[in-house]
Every structure is written in structure tokens, then in C-alpha cells.
Amino acid sequence: MTLDEMLALLPDNTTGEISPADLRAIVSDLYDAAHTTGDSYAYKWSTSGGAPNTGYVTMDQPWQTFATTLRISETTSDGLALGFGVLDGAVAARIWLSTAAGAKLTATVTGPSVDQGPYRDVPISVQSIVGNQPANNSAVTVSIAVVT
């Protein structure tokens, strides 16, 4: 929630019209922001939906709102070994997949990742998709934010 969205939930309080639900939403988002860490990683997109090769990311239903699993190589396309401890131990986590062309997929992580050897299956709930699925082998940025 942005600052403007938070302030919109707090009308001029001379009449006491701030609802408990609005106040709870604001406090929760402020708490999450104070306890959130995140980073972005370079990957390539695979349209196959199967086990990703090293440096690739895909989903069980690629670029679909009904996808339930993000399949992500434990090694990024630029050779960085990605650790999953923080993600798996998070209170809450969110993942964004984005492309240089402006396509973006936002998902909430719904549980700990499952080690599949060279890659992980991360259970997700897709929240939104903007733009078309990236072409096979396209560069994709994977951004992960966790609340600890």
C-alpha cells in the first residue's frame, strides 16, 4: 500500500470516521514494510513449464493466473547461487517476474519451496499479470520480498 493509499483511508478525523479495518490495514502494511527484505535476480524465461535448466525460471502453467508453482533454478542466469532459507522461513513473501518490455507477474508465496535438486518448486498464488508472456529464453528479472 502506498502512502497516498494509506492517507486516503484516513479521512479528516474531526468526525471519527476512521474504521478499525482501515487502521489495521495501515498498521499491517507499515509493520510489513519495516520487516521486509528483498532482492532481484537475473534469469531467463522458459515457456515449457517443466523442470527449468540452470539459470531459468518457469511456472507449472506459464504466465497464467491459475498457476500454482514457480519453478526456479537454484542458480541465476549470471551464475549466482540462490539460497532459499530466508524465503522458506518468511512470515510472508511476494515474488515479481518482470521483463524489459514491461510485462509483470505478481505472486504471493503460499508455502516453503520444495527442493527438486537443481531447482525449487515454490508454491504461489498469482495476484496479477500485466502484459504478454515473455518469449522463450527472454531475460526476466525475479524480485523477491520477504517479511521476516
Image: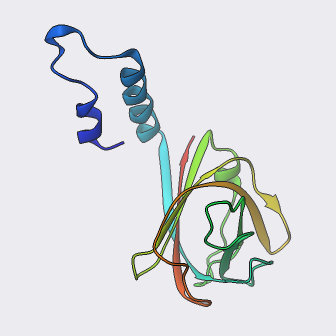
On screen, residue 82 above or below 9: below
Where's residue 64, x and y in %?
63, 67
On screen, residue 58 above or below 9: below
Residue closer to the observer: 61 or 91: 61
Whether residue 54 sits left or right of residue 64 in the image: it is right
Whether residue 15 sits left or right of residue 111 in the image: it is left
Where's residue 83, x and y in %?
68, 62
Report the residue at 62% width, 78% height from top. Answer: 76
Where's residue 102, x and y in %?
39, 76
Image quadrant assignment for residue 6: top left
Whether residue 105 sits left or right of residue 87 in the image: it is left
Quarter of the image with the N terminus in it: top left
Report the residue at 50% width, 56% height from top. Answer: 38
Quarter of the image with the C terminus in it: top right
User: Which colouring convention does the figure follow?
Assistant: rainbow
On screen, residue 4 above or below 37: above
Count how many numbered circles sit on residues in the image: 0
Report the residue at 28% width, 28% height from top. Answer: 9
On screen, residue 12 above or below 14: below
Report the residue at 69% width, 44% height from top. Answer: 89
In the displayed image of the protein, which residue is found farthest to the top? 15
